[in-house]
Amino acid sequence: MRVGFGSEKRNTASFAAAAALGSTERRPVRGEEFLVRDDLTKALRRGDITGATYALSRALSILHPARVRARFGDVARPGPRDGTLILRDLVAHYNELSPAQRVEAQSILARPTDGAGDPEGDGYAVTEEAPVCNANACIHYVTSTTDAPPAGWVDSTTTAFDTVWAKEITQYGYRPPKSDITSTNHGPDGRIDIYLADVGANGLYGYCTTDDPNALNPNFDVSVFCVVDNDMSPAQFQGAASGVPALQVTLAHEFFHAVQAAYDFFEDAWYAEGTATWMEDEVFDAVNDNLQFLRSSQLRQPFVPLDFSDLRYSYVYGAWIWFRFMSEYFGPKASDDPSIIRRSWEYADASAGAPDQYSLKAIASAIKERDSNFGWAYADFGVWNDVPGLAYSEGNSYPVPPYANRHKITASRSVQAGKLVMDHLTQGYAGFVPRSGVSSTAKLRIAVDLPAVTTGSGASVVMINSNGGARYKVIRLNTKGDGRVIVPFGRRGIATVDVVITNASERTRCWIDNSFTFSCAGNPKDDRLKYLYAAGLIQ
């Protein structure tokens, strides 16, 4: 169900009672600290190492975690999907490395076909077979050593890749990957090369990186090659997707990084990974591997900024739900419109003469074309997340966000109030439940005292009925951030009334944070703001 609004004002809308809200319990949270970092990141933030040394060390932790831990201490091993952005960041810092560090970086960034002489030991140890090529790609493999795929895996890779290309390029209209013909070892020609190798031994499903000489100029639109695990063995990926389904979503995800590279390979991490994880489900809807990341999305952790980009935590992957929201929210009734995501990448395009907007600005520009604005959409995102089973097309399988506070309203305790402290691009949920002495015709007066609307303040009320349906109202704010609304609160008809408070601030000071924690390496301007709310019973 889409929550529509007009060109200037959001409308009050109803959710159809299409499904129950589910059984996930919502427990109060206390805004626990989420910026937990390992010792390598702490060394960077203290200024003990440069960004270039950090990027090289993080890349080395893929292949040789013990070596990096011996120097820095507690260093997290990269996750199975982290390789692309870790290697991308190494490329971005390449010119800042010492001559000895560059040699090490080149060996990490080498193609498998660069051979067994690779000092890092991750190249093919034998001569590859003739690549299997079609109109769009060449698949590379060997028939012996641990890099050899099982029988039929090359065919499975070709079939899955053709499906990926048909969806992402032909149907969705994205720009195809750039030709790698200028790379020294470019394979048979300029088509994208996909190498099958035992990267699962290093804990990776796959990755894409670049040896495009233009990447060091720097150019932001570059060619890439991709490496995908040669068997997706359950033994190497315990408790996660394996086999052909893992191959399918890995190709959908990593190939979308190759597509992104044709626009801007060095875009913000949350945007690059969020859209790539979203694309998995667009191409292979039945696999649903990305559902695991909803636990690190704003459905479960609404107090973590949407654009938090630290790879050591899965928030960058959980951001896919925002892009699912965008495609459904701005789609026509009973369908979605994924073209808005492509449009945002067209605004992010950093090739010659293109707009080159960073992630949040690119998204805001695409939303503006739909006669809306980012703040309105982000506020309604919080409403959808409050009742995902009623709002999203597949929302019955989604969790619900936790309450910051939950209040019981009774005849004797008829007024309740609370305060939230929120960062940029976060949501807060306060629930009000009718209890003893509340009549069937009661109403609830809700007032909010929020920061000025220029800081991104927004508030809505979601009325969840006893029969499982829900509807919502926007709390209209004055410029100071104050507003109030009266809503039904009869005990027989209303199960709970939720106040959804939004900090939709995009305001930041760009290019000042060498850890790139948030969008455009920025320092957000509207964090740790105070949001007050109160509710009083009327009967």
Image (spheres, grey):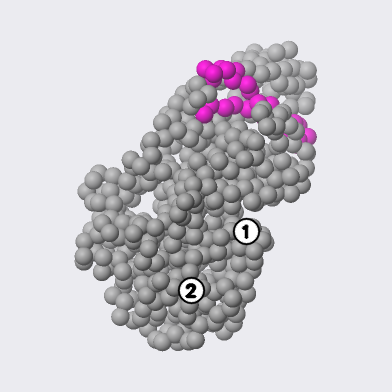
Residue drawn 50% across and 25% down? 454
Upstream in sequence: badge 2 or badge 1: 1
Q: CA distance from mark 2 to mark 1?
A: 20 Å
- Quadrant for residue 405, please give it: top right
Q: Residues within 10 Å of mark 1 (few under 14, many from 20)?
A: few
Find the magenta span and give its range.
Answer: 456-483
Decide whether residue 25 is among the magenta residues: no
Question: On the image, numbered disc 1 is attached to which residue?
Answer: 173
Percent x, y of residue 277: 55, 56
Percent x, y of residue 464: 71, 31
Front residue of 275/179: it is: 179
Percent x, y of residue 392: 68, 45
Percent x, y of residue 370: 65, 40
Residue drawn 28% across and 75% down? 119
**Horizontal placement of 55 versus 179: left or right?**
left
- Give above or below for 403 relative to 110: above
Residue type at numbered disc 1:
Gly
- Give above or below for 382 relative to 454: below
- Quadrant for residue 292, please give it: bottom right
Specify the quadrant that holds the N terminus. top right
Q: Residues within 10 Å of mark 2 (few under 14, many from 20)?
A: some
Q: Are marks 2 and 1 in contact (CB under 8 Å)?
A: no
Front residue of 262/42: it is: 262
Question: On the image, numbered disc 2 is attached to which residue?
Answer: 190
Mark 2 element type: loop
